[in-house]
Image (cartoon, rainbow, N blue to C red):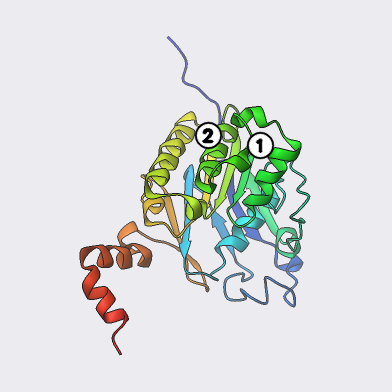
Amino acid sequence: MRKPSTALKAPFLKRVSLLPEKAERNKFPFTRFADLLTDDFFMEFTHPVTIFVGENGSGKSTILQALAKLAGFAAGGGDAWFQLHYTADTTDTTLVQALRPAWLPKVSNGFFFRSDTFADVARYIDDEGNQAIHGGPLWERSHGEIFMSVFNDRFAPTKRCMYLMDEPENALSPMRQFELMRLMRDWEMSGNAQMIMATHSPILMSYPGADLRYFSGTGIEPISYDEIEHVQITRAFLNNPARVLDELFRD
């Protein structure tokens, strides 16, 4: 009889907490998110997939970039070995130095996907990387095709890894977002991938079993899918576009 597997599976990053004595309160991001980054700030990760939701400027990307740095990725995006020529690694380390991660085990393989800097990541792949991995130069494709090529070819959880994604929906059509979700399910089922994503997409927010975290600007709380404002607004619009537009443009 085969013994049950004792291999450690995702999530690998279990917890992040703030070290108050290392928090430089007169510097960003503590000045910007003073109500969020309190002395007792912590986050626990109990699911293979965690999704950050909330308005622009609520701290999602700031926290995600800090987690990427803790995992060993460059703040500009890519894997641990990327050295981008066009996007400097300028993320302030003030927050990173004040965070204490708890890993089981420590994982540094994976990829940090940032939609806002991804043009530079793609350029780096074309200039310095192995184009054959993607079947040819990335610049010959649309933005959405580049995104999906990287997700298909660079996100391969053959060993334990972290996948951090900041607004991956930006260049993806609804059908491409569904394709990404199917890939996410494959990665999750491998047991080797922990995913943390920040998104404004109600489609991606619906990923089954994801731990949804709402960033209010002053805190982070669990939230259900139907409670998310993005979902409520999108649903109201699709149910009656004319009424919503009439209210929007009413004098």
Q: Label for residue 80?
A: none
Residue 102 located left or right of residue 206: right
Camera-side residue of 8 and 197: 197
Q: Can you identify the residue that label 2 sits on?
A: 152
Q: Is residue 143 above or below residue 54?
A: above
Q: Which mark is residue 109?
A: 1
Tag 2 secondary structure: helix
Please state the horizontal and vertical placement of residue 102, each as a whole percent of the image.
64, 48
Spatial CA span between label 1 and label 2: 16 Å
Determine crowd level at label 1: few under 14, some 14-19, many 20+ residues with C-alpha closer than 10 A.
some
Q: Nearer the viewer, residue 91 or 18?
A: 91
Given residues 5 and 208, the one toward you in this image is: 208
Q: How many numbered callouts?
A: 2
Q: Amino acid at mark 1?
A: Asn
In percent of the image, x 24 and y 68: which residue is there?
A: 241
- In front of the other: 121 or 27: 121
Q: Vertical placement of 95 versus 79: above or below?
A: below
Outermost top residue: 1
* Residue 71 in sight from this viewpoint: no
